[in-house]
Amino acid sequence: MSKILKIFKISDLRNKVLFILALLVVFRVAAAIPIPGVDTDRLKDFFANNQLFSLISAFTGGGLDSFSIAMLGLGPYITASIIMQLLTMIFPGLEQMYKYEGEAGRQKFNQYSRLLTVPLAIIQGYAFIVLLSRQGAIGQLDIFTWASSLLVIAAGSVFLMWLGELISEKNLGNGVSLMIFAGIVAGFPNTMRQAFLTYSAQQLFTYVGFVVVALIVIAGVVYLTEAQRNIPINYARRIRGSKVFGGVSTYLPMRVNNAGVMPIIFALSILLFPGMVASFFSTSSVAFIASIARFFNDFIQNQLAYGIMYFLLVVLFTYFYTAVTFDPKSISENIQKQGGYIPGIRPGHPTSQFLLHLLNRVTLVGAIFLGVIAVLPSVVQGLSGVSTFAIGGTSILIVVSVVLETMKSVDAQLSMYEY
């Protein structure tokens, strides 16, 4: 409470918080505006009976099941960011731009991600419209409604991307994460209502078990986010005239989970895409393609296969995002320039190798722990047979991680104003 009071006592910080809350309200309003010419009742019936699309809808903030102007959510922007960051491993020029050209290089890199978002939004919007038409969720659309719907969907994705970047500029958390958080929180009351409507006395222990697992997930995410390995660093004493500089000991914090919530968001984006493509081709007129699509769709619907793929993708993206955000070479160079060294390790390349070795080991623990926490709700869902649990568990994981990241950003802002 004392921190909340401090936020509202500092006018600049208070204005930032109110601005972010206003943008989140705008996002929720956009998610509730349906595209004209679509029967929303048929859509809701379709999503109520399809677990995969219910998860996709929850991930997009509930805009998909109402066929709103924000139906794709931030999916195209996240996909564009993943593609661009993967391309840095293929093209050295992009890596040079992103890592070594400073703020100007990152701005140019981000501009490429924004431009890539537009065609991806058009492609994903087209795929969703065709898919929902084939599934009978929406009726036949004329060419004008088709074109206007596609343009509105693409414009909605770009609009949400813009809102997300406006939120990020306030330095109180990642805009993309906060908007996904807002969409999930907005859907919690409906999830709880469905859980109570389907409740029966025989499921008492199942529901109690889910509450216990939810508490374990929350505690695990908090523990994982706070955990860090402290690497000691000594600074040599330097005498300039009559003044002495350095001669102090400090430490470099290496977080067990450097990537935060982004591996979960990236893994879900990649995991949901093949299922959507398989559903798209499952009604194809070509029998061979339709049979392959149905086989793959059944494979994705299998809880064991889904859990294994989810776990592996979370581990993979934890390593990938950590490699993007934590560069041992540049950190070792900065330590050397400031006259620092790690006890027992020579400055320069040996320090870089030592940090890389430690990073791989620490990240392995964090990646496996995060992967286990991610699939734990799906395991409970498979044992209990209640489909609400898998969606709710993934949502809890994202919500807790985003809250912790935002709290750290707020603490950093408060510390800056205090000093």
Image (cartoon, rainbow, N blue to C red):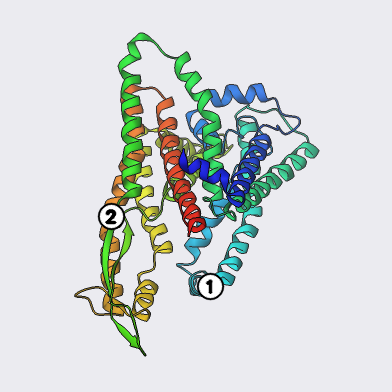
Picture quadrant of residue 203? top left
Q: Residue furthest top?
A: 201
Residue, x 65% and y 21% (percent of image)?
A: 41
For disc 1, the marked residue is 102
For disc 2, the marked residue is 364
The percent position of residue 386, horizontal first and vertical second, equals: 39, 22
The answer to whether 379 is drawn above or below residue 147 in the figure is above
Foreground: 111 or 219? 219
Residue, x 52% and y 30% (percent of image)?
A: 54
Foreground: 336 or 312? 336
Number of marks in the rendered image: 2
User: Dot 1: what SS?
Assistant: helix
Marked residue nearer the N-terminal end (1 or 2): 1
Picture quadrant of residue 140? top right
- Local packing at callout 1 (Cα closer than 10 Å; few below 14, some 14-19, many 20+) is few
Q: Amino acid at mark 1?
A: Gly
Q: Amino acid at mark 2?
A: Leu
Residue 283 seen from this side: yes
The percent position of residue 126, horizontal first and vertical second, equals: 66, 43
User: Dot 2: what SS?
Assistant: helix
Residue 350: give its label.
none
Is 126 displayed left or right of 406 in the figure?
right
